[in-house]
Amino acid sequence: METKKEIKKNWFHRLMFGLNILSAVALLFSYAASSISPEKIWWLAFFGLGYGTLLFINFLFALFWMSARSKKSILSLIIIVCGAGKIFNIFEIHYFSSEPVHKKEGAFPIKVMSFNVRLFDLYNWMHNSETREKIFDFLSKESPDILCLQEYYTNDSIKSGFKNNDTLKKIIPAAYSNIEYSTTQRETYHWGIAMFSKLPIISKQAVHFQATGGNIFIYSDVLVGSDTVRVYNAHLESIRFRQQDYKFIENLGSDVEQDEVKESLNILSRLKPAFIKRARQVEVLHQHIKESPYPVIVCGDFNDTPSSYTFSRICDGLEDSFRESGSGPGKTYAGAFPSFRIDYILHDPKFTSAGYRTIHEKLSDHYPISCWIEKR
């Protein structure tokens, strides 16, 4: 006959195994999220977003059952092993990933950087009047051959302190540029996306996902020595959180009173349309990349994680520079929302990357990323 202690233990183990099954199924859903478009099953994208957390929970369950000397640990271990390759999308280890020692001007290898500059802190989100100048100092010091900027802003008026087009062309010597605006007000205030290059741009184009405003991508055909490379810079649909959403996230776990159910539902209501819009946008971008007559480099803020349909679709047929030469956690988002890797530099398999870095300079709500691209 079982003692009370044994009964409690058995019920506890049953409860834990029930939760273990739920977490294992959720992790499987997160795997499926990268293969199924949110246009078909939108709720799977939520599990893709939570892949890192679900992986950690299943790992804890495996440890729990192993400590209890139970074969139930096999469940989570099998599920983790099934998606083991995805782990390296969020954490990589490369002990030897150095930058090139000899660099010939105008030829491979080339240094590529992608950075969401958050309008150069136009609205003083960073509470620091020097943020814009710090960004320029940083870019001048890094001196990439190709610089892709998202959430770009410039003001053409004579008295403006944000004539960023002119400033950036001074920072990147003899710069060629491809700048496209999604929104313009009063003829001089411009919001959009930009690419600056030390290397000649022989043709360029922009693709708008909608008639006015909204997200866009641009591409530039760049001469690197005797080779032509098509460089994409993309900014895909963001979640468009309101200020109160960010405050709610910041105050979680604190003593601040807030309606957690209502605010959580508000956040979920913003995530769903963003998932679906990105799914539509990524099909346009993917097709464009497939039809490129030249090998490609794809930079940008995709606003989605490596476990997402967005990433797997764009990365189809391309190499991920973080996977190839990065090290440590890959997170690039630096805002209030839980940190994810949402900024990328991808490239054609004809190239290889070295010295990938996520540069932890707090100049925006994104960290800049860079790497060296070389021909194989």
Image (cartoon, rainbow, N blue to C red):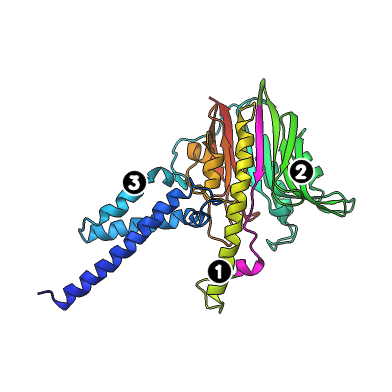
Disc 3 vs disc 2: Cβ atoms closer than 8 Å? no
Q: Residue 180 carries which label?
A: 2
What amino acid is at disc 2? Glu
Q: Dot 3, how many residues are within 10 Å of its Cα: few (below 14), some (14-19), or many (20+)?
A: few
- The image shows residue 38 at horizontal and vertical percentages of 54, 52
- Name the residue at the top extreme: 226
Residue 328 seen in the current view: yes
Question: The magenta stretch spans which residues?
Answer: 229-247
Question: Which image quadrant for residue 355?
Answer: top right
Along the line of sight, the residue nearer the viewer: 221 or 373: 221
Please report whichever mark, 3 or 2, sits nearer to the chain's N-terminal start.
3
SS of the residue under disc 2: strand
Q: Label 1 is placed on what type of residue?
A: Leu
Rate crowding at label 2 as few (under 14), some (14 to 19) or many (20 or more) other CA atoms within 10 Å: many
Q: Are marks 3 and 1 in contact (CB under 8 Å)?
A: no
Query: Residue under circle 3?
Result: 81
Dot 3 or dot 1: first in sequence order is 3
Q: Residue at x 45, y 54 (%)?
A: 51
Distance in Å between CA atoms under marks 3 and 1: 33 Å
| Element under disc 1 | helix
Residue 143 in view, yes or no: no
Whole-angstrom CA distance, mark 3 to mark 2, is 44 Å
79 lies left or right of 4: right
Taking 313 as reference, is 41 above or below it? below
Secondary element at image label 3:
helix
Whether residue 6 sits left or right of residue 342 in the image: it is: left
State the image coordinates of residue 130 (x, y, percent, origin top left): 73, 57
What is the spatial separation of the Cα atoms under label 1 and label 2, in whole angstroms?
35 Å
Q: Which circle's residue, 1 or 2, is located before the other in the chain?
A: 2
Residue marked by disc 1: 265
**In the displayed structure, does residue 2 sit left or right of residue 115?**
left
Front residue of this view, candidates 46 and 211? 211
